[in-house]
Each structure stands twice: as structure tokens, then as C-alpha cells.
Amino acid sequence: MKFLNNYNFKNKKVLLRVDFNVPLDKETGEVTDDKRIKAALPTINYILDQGGALILLSHFGRPKEGKEDKYSLSQILPCLEKCIGKEVFFSPDCIGDSAKQMSDSLLPGQVLLLENVRFYKEETQGDLHFAQELASLGDCFVNDAFGAAHRAHASTTQIASFFPDDKMMGFLMQGEIDNANKIMQSTAHPFTAIVGGAKVSDKILIVENLLLKADNIIIGGGMAYTFFKAMGGEIGNSLCETDRLETCLSILSQAKERGVSIYLPIDSIIADQFSATANIQNSPSDAIPQNWMALDIGVKACIDFETVLLNSKTILWNGPMGVFEMEAFENGTKSVAYAVAKATKAGAFSLIGGGDSAAAIMKFGLEDEVSYVSTGGGALLEYFEGKQLPGLLALEN
């Protein structure tokens, strides 16, 4: 595979697949979180500095009926221009005459943003003809959209086949893979994985794969209560996947066989309704009263989890400990975030696995106190599940 720093971009028109699927303010239409744009800047700036002309491809939202104004990438132009520090041209289509004319007239050092590739159903279908139309706009292809690398879409996967000798990953994609491999291939022990979120079914594959790698697995969030139910505990109205009870028992059995320590929250913050203003109390996690539900890990669990994390050399965090979006139920996630930061300061390598975990680390202002914050929730999850990412595979073949 070729890499950016050993490719000559001078006078080349570079098709750069980015992930600019950023959140917008519903009233003003302004970008509310520009971290995905900023994450692509090292690749963007490098190509421009090397004398290339940039043609940016991205998806935005999930349009269902072709072109929809609310999913137009034109909305991010002001933020993009501010981040790059120069004018960005915009094509109202990603293929066709307008896109072709604007691409052809682009000069070295200039930047063109194409309209949302998902305005064409052929994008998500992985249509080869659509990929060929996109490919015709440039001389080479760089994929820096790690967050979409698990999708076998036209602009992330099929397009690469039209550049057999002129395709490569960007700095962001390379950084994501390098840091993920520090977890999975060159692991310093003890290795602790923190797995949270609502459902066991969402995380079963990553947990099973981690049983082969980790020394400790901390389980929090709604998924923990399916484990307690499986072990005969009373969990009130807490989240529970009754069809996954045997799965939980199997995980606990496999962990015991492999000498992997599973840590579940010994206590929980419970509420009498799913509300920021609910009545709350601390309860043993396996003895939650009827009509009450667990919405965060408890005081003792925070202490237990911190002790494990401070004795770890490698930490992977994927999924919150509770409903951290509500202040009443943020303490567990906040406690884990600070423990991960403290362990990192003491020399541990910590990777925050995108999605809600990244949102949490940002909320508590700790993004600079951990080793790496991933931009790709689903893609990173599939990578840790041992799956091959189509977007990455397309660059290797």
C-alpha cells in the first residue's frame, strides 16, 4: 500500500474521501462540532502543500429521497473554509457536467467540495458505474474517512478499484489503524477494556474478541443488567435483553476459563422513571426494587472500576456507564473518564473508541489527557470485532 508521504501530489487532482458528517444547529444551520473536519486537516494541508488540487467527497446524514436541502454539504462551507483557511469551491452535484467542469478547472492549491454522495442511491448500493463517474474527476484517490471505512459504499470502496497504483490512506485513517493495532497487536499488560452502552447484542462480538486479548473487562451501562438478570439478580425495570441471558452466562464462563476478570457494577444509581427530575437512590445492582431502573453505576462501582484502571497499562473504552447526557446520571461515566485520564498520566496507553465514549471525554474536557480519541465509532467497533473493513481492504488490494 502507498502512503501519503511517499507519493508525489504535484499538479495532481486528488480525490479525497473525508467524513464531514458533522452535527448542525437546527435553528442556525451552523456546525456545532467541527472535530471531524479538524481531524482531516493534516491530510488536507499536506496535499495542498505538496502542490495538489483537492476534490473532497463526503456523505452527510441519511437522505432517502434524492437531493434534500437539509442534507446539503453546502451548509458546512463556512466552517470548512474557516478550518482550512482558504476559499472552498462547491459543486452542487458530485457527478455530471457541473462536477466535471469544476474539477477540470481546479488549479494546484485549490479546494473543491462536491455535494453529498448519498443523494444518489448508487452510493450506498456500492454501484460500480457511480464509483467510476466519481473516479473520473481525479488522478488519484485518498481515503481518510475512517468513520465510514466499514461501509462497502461506492465512494469508500469501489472507487479505489479505478486507481490500482494511485490509492492510499490519509493521515487520519493511518492514525486510527496504528492506534487500534497498539491495542490488538502490541498490547502492554495489564490490558483493561471498558465496554458500556445499552445492549449486549450491540457489543457481543467485541466482548468475545476481547476475551482473547484482555486481562480485565469492565462492563457498564444498560447492558450490565442483562448480566445481573442472567445470574439470578433482581433488576426492576432496568434494561434487559431476555434473549441474551444465555449469551451473558457464556461470556462469564469463557472469561473464567481464560482467566479474564469481568467487572460488573456492584451498585447502581436507580430512578423511579427515565427522567432528569426522577427520584434517585443508590442500590445493589442485583437487588433493584420493582418499578425502579438503573441509569448509572453506583458509588462503590466507581471506586472498584477506578482501582482496576489505575493498575492498567493499556485501556480501551467503548460505551458509557449510564445516561451521561443527564446530569443526575453522569457521575459513573465521568468517574471512568477521569480514571482513564489519571491512568494515562501514569503511563498507560488509552484509546477512546468513538461514538458516545468520545462525546463523553469531550464533555468532561479530557480529550487532551488520553492517548487517542477515535473518530470512528462503528468502524472501530468492527475492527475490534475482527472484521475486515471494506474501505481499508480496497486500499490494500
Image: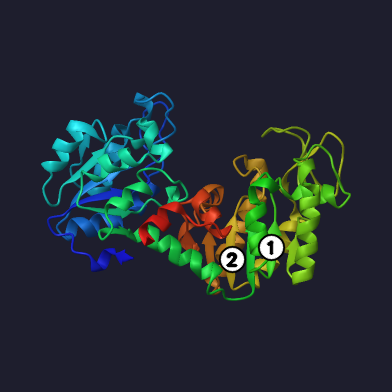
Q: Secondary structure at mark 2?
A: strand
Task: Give x and y (percent) for residue 374.
Answer: 47, 56
The residue lying at 80 percent from left, 36 percent from top is 237
Of residue 108 and residue 246, the one placed in the foreground of this image is 246
Instruction: Please name the amino acid that badge 1 sits on.
Output: Ile
Of residue 252 and residue 137, the one placed in the foreground of this image is 137
Task: Give x and y (percent) for residue 146.
Answer: 42, 53
In the image, taking residue 304 as reference, residue 65 lies left or right, namely left
Can you see residue 388? yes
- The tag earlier along the polypeptide, 2 or 1, is 1
Task: Give x and y (percent) for residue 395.
Answer: 36, 58
Instruction: Please name the amino acid that badge 2 sits on.
Output: Ile
Within-10-Å neighbours for mark 1: few <14, some 14–19, many 20+: many
- Residue bearing the label numbered 1: 217
**63 shown above or below 219:** above
The residue lying at 33 percent from left, 58 percent from top is 170
Of residue 121 and residue 375, the one placed in the foreground of this image is 121
In the image, taking residue 136 as reference, residue 128 lies left or right, namely right
Q: Secondary structure at mark 1?
A: strand
Q: Which residue is most to the front?
A: 129
- Residue bearing the label numbered 2: 315
The C terminus - image quarter:
bottom left
Is the C-beta separation of discs 2 and 1 under 8 Å?
Answer: no
Res 115 → quadrant: top left
Within-10-Å neighbours for mark 2: few <14, some 14–19, many 20+: many
Of residue 122 and residue 369, the one placed in the foreground of this image is 122
The N terminus - image quarter:
bottom left
